[in-house]
Amino acid sequence: MARGNTRQRIQDVALELFAEQGYEKTSLREIAERLDVTKAALYYHFKTKEDILVGLFHDLTRPMDELIVWAREQPRTLETKQEILRRYQVALADAAPLFRFMQENQATVRELSVGLTFKERMLELSGLVQEPDFAMKDKVRCISALFTMHAGMFFMQNVEGDPEEKHEAVLEVALDLVAQAHGA
């Protein structure tokens, strides 16, 4: 198996175990056992659990970084902000396992370097969907639009209905919040 494929397999299995048992209760030994490799083989690719998580985080949040770079270069219009939300929803969906892990392990994530990095990304993204001169209620609407998308990913799983319809409804609510903030 190629090195890149091995790293990906390690990350996938680790994320599975982190989701099943929690980050703190998962050991490198258990990851190696699930992969049917030696701990030495695992250490060749990752020295610590945090290294695995950091690698996962970088791979799965790359679209979020690309979105931020793209958004910085766009005019600060309502249409741009709505497109940011559309693209962010795609990035969230693509990284759903990681974001679920982060949601379920918030205390642990806060202690790790990825927690601070994610917080910085969210602050930057929230700044890109609002304007500094907005009234407070409009700033809240813009920030709520982002959190609507997060809540939609996690909590709408428990709501009966067509997944695509739920996906569209969450996006529509987020877009509406930003439009209201812009007086549209």
Image: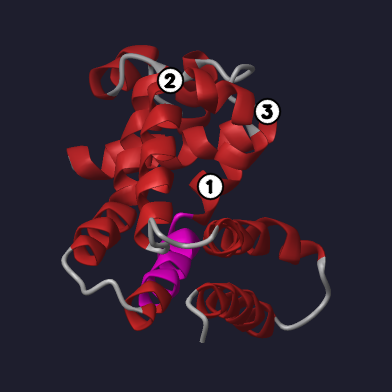
Describe residue 81's horizontal placement relative to residue 106 as left or right. Answer: left
The tag earlier along the polypeptide, 1 or 3, is: 3
Local packing at callout 1 (Cα closer than 10 Å; few below 14, some 14-19, many 20+) is some
Describe residue 109's horizontal placement relative to residue 52 as left or right. Answer: right
Calculate the distance from the C-alpha at mark 1 to the C-alpha at mark 2: 17 Å
Q: Which residue is mark 1?
A: 99
Calculate the distance from the C-alpha at mark 2 to the C-alpha at mark 3: 14 Å
The tag earlier along the polypeptide, 1 or 2, is: 2
The tag earlier along the polypeptide, 2 or 3, is: 3
Which residue: 52% across, 81% down? 183
Magenta region includes residue 141: no
Q: Which residue is mark 2?
A: 49
Residue in the foreground of this view, choosing between 38 and 120: 120
Q: Quadrant of residue 52?
A: top left
Q: Quadrant of residue 63?
A: bottom left
Q: Label 1, secondary structure: give it.
A: helix
Find the magenta span and give its range: 83-95
Q: Label 3, secondary structure: give it.
A: helix
Q: Which residue is mark 3?
A: 21
